[in-house]
Image (spheres, rainbow, N blue to C red):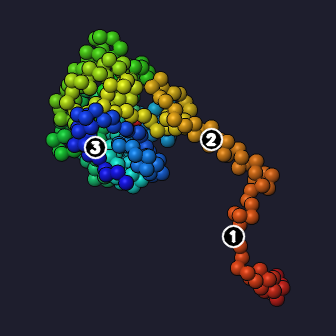
Amino acid sequence: MAQKKGILDFQKMKKEGEKVTWLTAYDYPTAQFEEWGGIDMILVGDSMGMCVYGYSAGTMPVTMDQCIVHTEAVRRGAPNTYVMGDMPFLSYQTTPDEAVRNAGRFYKEAGVDAVKLEGGRRIVKMIKAIADAGMVVCGHIGLTPQSTGQFGGYKAQGRTAESACELIKDARAVQEAGAPLLLLEAVPPEVGRLITEELTIPVYGIGAGPYVDGQLLIVSDMLGLFQAFTPRFVKKYANLAEQTIKAMKDYVDEVKQAKFPEEKHYYKMIKGEFEKLMELLADSPS
Ligand code: KIV
């Protein structure tokens, strides 16, 4: 089994040009598969709002308690993988104190290696407070799903010179505030490249092109499980929804047609015990 990676490994990988592989997970079995598949880092994303809970309001209703329960399960499934907790809406935006307390819950209750917060310059006080308390913070800028109301939907960011400039300022501020990792979401590759080359910390992307230091995908997208919509940056490596529905239909057909269970699925009585049972029943009529 590969050794669990840490922040020093991620810095070394950036220097040596080795890409980091990063996926979300929300449960124990998926975390196991990711660890066995050699994934470097797992995010227990608040995307669970869509992928697990089916909330039409996306990530916004997700609570700290839900994140903690799912992160604990992921930690148990992937004890040798870097696990990051995703701070849900209103768990860090109000005050630095509240941000520290909630980041601390991820560490104390779920055993994470890092936490992630959405936002650039407007949340530097929270990033600094969490980092000052000794925790590892990953910044997240670009399309930040907790602010899609302000963006007018799930829209790529940094597509104009002006908006790219704002993102670059945000990236600098996040690094300056003490975050040793940064995630860029849904930005053009040129912007991904500029930020990755300028910052000394590892910069990862989800829909940020090929020049970033590592790639993140939402596991439900890449496995073809999430059906509501597919962002442009998703590559489906499997179509598990199709396979799962086919398995369900085959089960329904086989049970209805008495093709399942077959003899190999039966438990056998110990030799001679059935005859004994018949005698017992004959001796004690109901
Ligand atoms: O919650 C999540 O999975 C995320 C990704 C969209 C980056 O934050």
Q: Which mark is residue 267?
A: 1
Q: Amino acid at mark 1?
A: Tyr
State the image quarter where residue 282 is shown: bottom right
Q: From this view, report whether residue 63 is shown above or below residue 205.
A: below
Q: Residue at x 31, y 22 (%)?
A: 192
Q: Position of residue 118 (x, y in %)?
A: 31, 31
Badge 1: few (under 14), some or many (20 or more) residues near its Cα, within 10 Å? few
Mark nearest the camera among 2 and 3 is: 2
**Precedes in sequence: disc 2 or disc 1:** 2
Amino acid type of the residue that numbered disc 3 sits on in the rendered structure: Ala
- Inspect the image, locate mark 2, and give the three-letter code of the amino acid beneath it: Gln
For marks 2 and 3 on the same chain, the one whose residue lies earlier in the sequence: 3
- Name the element at disc 1: loop
Looking at the figure, which quarter contains the C terminus? bottom right
Q: Which residue is mark 2?
A: 243
Residue that appears at 67% across and 46% down: 248
- Left/right placement of residue 247 relative to residue 91 reads right
Q: Is residue 121 visible?
A: no
Q: Quadrant of residue 171?
A: top left
Alpha carbon distance from label 2 to label 3: 34 Å
Secondary element at image label 2: helix
Q: Position of residue 4 (x, y in %)?
A: 31, 50
At label 2, counting other C-alpha atoms closer than 10 Å, the crowd grade (few under 14, some 14-19, many 20 or more) is few
Residue for badge 3:
114
Split into quadrants, the picture shows ligand 1 in the one at top left
Q: Nearer the viewer, mark 1 or mark 3?
A: 1
Q: Is residue 277 left or right of residue 42?
A: right
